[in-house]
Image (cartoon, helix red, strand yellow):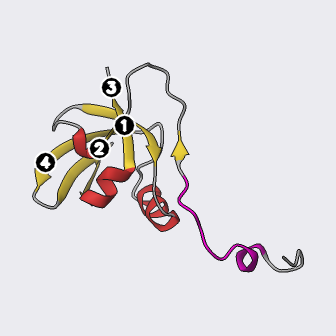
């Protein structure tokens, strides 16, 4: 591999990476899809391909943030983070690892 090539050219294929926050408790993380409506949770990790992670971060969903499922729909969820409400499809909901807030 030529070290003079820009990094983008050398690493053409991106592998899925996890953005993760260290857990402070022993409760196992669950996906956002498993969280019951109305129960606040803390985002521990964002898993999946780079474009999905960037999309979720752009929506204000980041590790350490608090999120609440407001509504379940047939193809996704409506969630709240702070004063923002966001609709997520099941793919996005499965990529968020959360723990129930106490």
The alpha-carbon separation of the residues under discs 3 and 1 comes to: 9 Å
Q: Quadrant of residue 99?
A: top left
Secondary structure state at the residue bearing disc 1? strand
Residue at the extreme left? 74
Residue pointed to by mark 1: 98
The answer to whether marks 1 and 2 mark residues whose Cβ atoms lie closer than 8 Å is: yes
Residue pointed to by mark 2: 32
Is residue 23 inside the magenta stretch?
no
The alpha-carbon separation of the residues under discs 4 and 2 comes to: 12 Å
**In this view, the mark in front (3 or 1):** 1
Q: Is residue 28 above or below residue 11?
A: above
Q: Residue at x 55, y 55 (%)?
A: 17
Q: Earlier in the sequence, mark 4 or mark 1?
A: 4
Q: Which SS does the magenta portion mostly show?
A: loop
Q: Is residue 17 above or below residue 3?
A: above
Q: Quadrant of residue 92?
A: bottom left
**In this view, the mark in front (4 or 2):** 2
Coordinates of residue 68 in the picture (x, y in percent): 25, 39
Q: Quadrant of residue 35?
A: top left
Q: Residue at x 53, y 59 (%)?
A: 16
Q: Is residue 8 above or below residue 58?
A: below
Q: Nearer the viewer, residue 92 or 59?
A: 92
Where, quadrant-wise, is the C terminus in this rendering?
top left
Q: Earlier in the sequence, mark 4 or mark 2?
A: 2
The label number, if any, that marks residue 101 in the structure image: 3
The alpha-carbon separation of the residues under discs 3 and 4 comes to: 18 Å
Residue pointed to by mark 4: 71
| Magenta span | 7-17
Secondary structure state at the residue bearing disc 2? helix
Is residue 14 inside the magenta stretch?
yes
């Amino acid at each position: 591999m030529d070290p003079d090539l820009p990094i983008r050219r050398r690493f053409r294929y991106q592998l899925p990476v996890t953005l993760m926050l260290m857990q402070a408790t022993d409760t196992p993380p669950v996906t956002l899809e498993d969280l019951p409506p109305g129960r606040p949770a803390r985002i521990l990790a964002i898993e999946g391909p780079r474009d999905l992670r960037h999309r979720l971060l752009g929506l204000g969903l980041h590790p350490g943030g608090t999120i609440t499922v407001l509504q379940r729909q047939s193809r996704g969820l409506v969630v709240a983070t702070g004063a923002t409400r966001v609709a997520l499809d099941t793919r996005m909901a499965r990529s968020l690892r959360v723990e129930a807030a106490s």
